[in-house]
Amino acid sequence: MITDLPFESAYRHGYARIAACTIPVALADPVANAQAVLETARECHDEAVAVAIFPELCLSGYSVEDLMMQDALLDGVVAAIERLVEASVDLLPMIIVGAPLRHRNRLYNCAVVIHRGELLGVAPKSYLPTYREFYERRWFAPGDDQIGEDIGVGELEAPFGPDLLFEALDVPGLVVHAEVCEDMWVPIPPSSRAALAGATVLANLSGSPITIARADDRKTLCQSQSFRCLAAYAYSAAGMGESTNDVSWDGQTMIYESGNLLAETERFPDGPRRSVADVDLDRLRQDRIRQGTFDDNRRSDATLFRTVHFELDPPGADIGLMRVLDRFPFVPDDPERLAQDCYEAFNIQVSGLVRRMEAIGAPKPVLGVSGGLDSTHALLVVARAMDRMGRPRSDILAYTMPGFATSDHTKSNAIALAEAVGASIETIDIRPLATEMLERIGHPFAEGEPVHDITFENVQAGIRTDYLFRLANHHGGMVIGTSDLSELALGWATYGVGDHMSHYTVNAGVPKTLIQHLIRWVISHGEGVDGSTRLSPEAARVLQSVLDTEISPELVPMTQDGRLQSTEDRIGPYALHDFALFHVLRYGFRPSKIAFLAAHAWGDADAGAWPPGFPDEDRYAYDLATIVKWLRVFLQRYFAFAQFKRSAVPNGPKVSPAGSLSPRGDWRAPSDGTATTWLAELDAALPDDLRG
């Protein structure tokens, strides 16, 4: 980890900026082509790019055909490489260019790797197409057998072979491998073995003339290769200037990271173009740590690679962050993807509940409904489960149990929703029993004093839970838990009571920010999952009212100025907590990196992506001080306060690919841990004025 760069530097937080470039090619004119490479490389330098990739044979032109074997052209290519090496002394990026090079008895189609005045290595193309419009074996030899070789390029010498990795000594995790065009199209590309050997950035220098739909084929291959290899895949194709004797060219460039498209350029450009993106090396490393089968694959296919080291000397200034950030990482900003996620999440919850109820004799589902988000969504899941089982919704036993702070608004919403979905609904006023308990334990509230402490709150929560479990006993039912993933992360649940304990919980795998969108999805799609729209207008009205209501446990009466007890005022915004939860649970990121990402996502109204239909965007504006304040709360609660509650949670289905917090699933941790290490890491990275 780079520790001597300031907090604002992307390189400090595990990013490396990659550029996939295409340039206009002058056929058989290495001098002009080298100049074009240099002009783009200098622009990449100004953008703080670490690795700049150029197309296949871009120093000569891919489509020069038999001119490829002319000594004048080959000599010119060597001179062009020497010029690039000399001119790269003061440039930041590693430059990877395509060139034809002589080696012993043959000619090779090569990726030439240059950095800061050195020829670091040359990787020959392993697989040569000789089908349809391709005739590469007419000119080149396949380089797959050139293992452990060296090559002379004019006065320069360098390692030669497809077995080369280029590792930055001062940017942890930046390990580059280069392959050429057709190498990506074979069943086992050279980059697959390179990734197993440690490469994180896979570069493909391509010629690839264009035909209808070939661009989609390339994208599929790049996406698949980056996903399977848990790597970044940068692709650069030849474009303007190549010969159009019998083919045409589109200059496609793109960068994928673990299957996600980070950047791409328009095709058929009229000048130089480049895709530029910050690749998250931490994410790639963490994914490989977690997916043990990745390294197991290496053990069964142990190919030896040579490593060439270099020093990038990355900039310490704030260079921004060139990648799309999701403000709500659990909630896709693409409408189609969000609808698909909601469909799958809802059905995962429904299917899990159906299976559990069928397995234990089809009991009546019992749940408390408060008019809040979690119990509302749980009721929708239960209603759909009953439909799937062919059972009447009237078998759903819903109870609203008003306490000392329950508002008429939430109580009426709970009753109206239960009636709208066809559940049985009963109101049980818990205040008399709560008052008696407070009297028996000698609490001052029973004597008329306005003491609203944790005992006052938990007496109400505990009585509600006692009622639910005894009602389930009495009616042959099972208690359905409603607490969500975000509450489990923060420990925002009373141990052993309704928001923590149940016979089966349906929301435990769903974060708060996604639950809001699931309810919106139900409003827009109805309760059905097969095209049916059984949601009544009254149910839709109530659901929207629930969404518009501030999140509150309603255990403490309003203040004299009419202020409602607010969960987010107490523990912080769920938007920020879900942001931290995703990056801790899914990737194990350092707190300083989470703060850095949150500052970029939330500090600029145009920086992060918004999910579709998200209301009140203006209320979500957080500066770094606010982000750090609530991140400290999250770290303390997540790593120290909440685990003993998570260690005892009931069964419930995993929903998010980021993981669950079940002690039997994705998250196993000691109940007596501390947050010291995480808080210290955050403070050590922050500017002095923000340290705790």
Image (tube, helix red, strand yellow):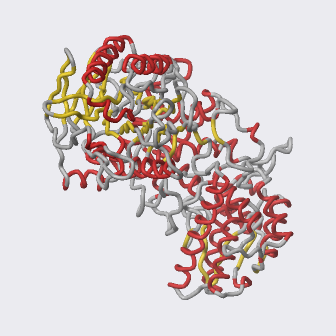
Residue 387 in the image: state x and y as whole percent: 67, 82
Q: Is residue 325 above or below residue 479?
A: above
Left or right of 659 in this view: 408: right
In this rendered view, identify the residue nearer to me: 683 or 496. 683
Asked which quadrant contains residue 539, the reply is bottom right
Residue 360 in the image: state x and y as whole percent: 52, 85
Left or right of 502 in this view: 445: right
Residue 562 in the image: state x and y as whole percent: 85, 45
Left or right of 648 in this view: 616: right
The N terminus - image quarter: top left
Q: Is residue 291 above or below residue 584?
A: below
Asked which quadrant contains residue 412, the reply is bottom right
Residue 587 in the image: state x and y as whole percent: 44, 45
Q: Is residue 527 above or below residue 494?
A: below
Left or right of 531 in this view: 131: left
Asked if one can make out residue 71 in the rendered structure from this viewpoint, the answer is yes
Q: Residue at x 39, y 48 (%)?
A: 133
Asked which quadrant contains residue 561, the reply is top right
Asked if one can make out residue 316 in the rendered structure from this viewpoint, the answer is no
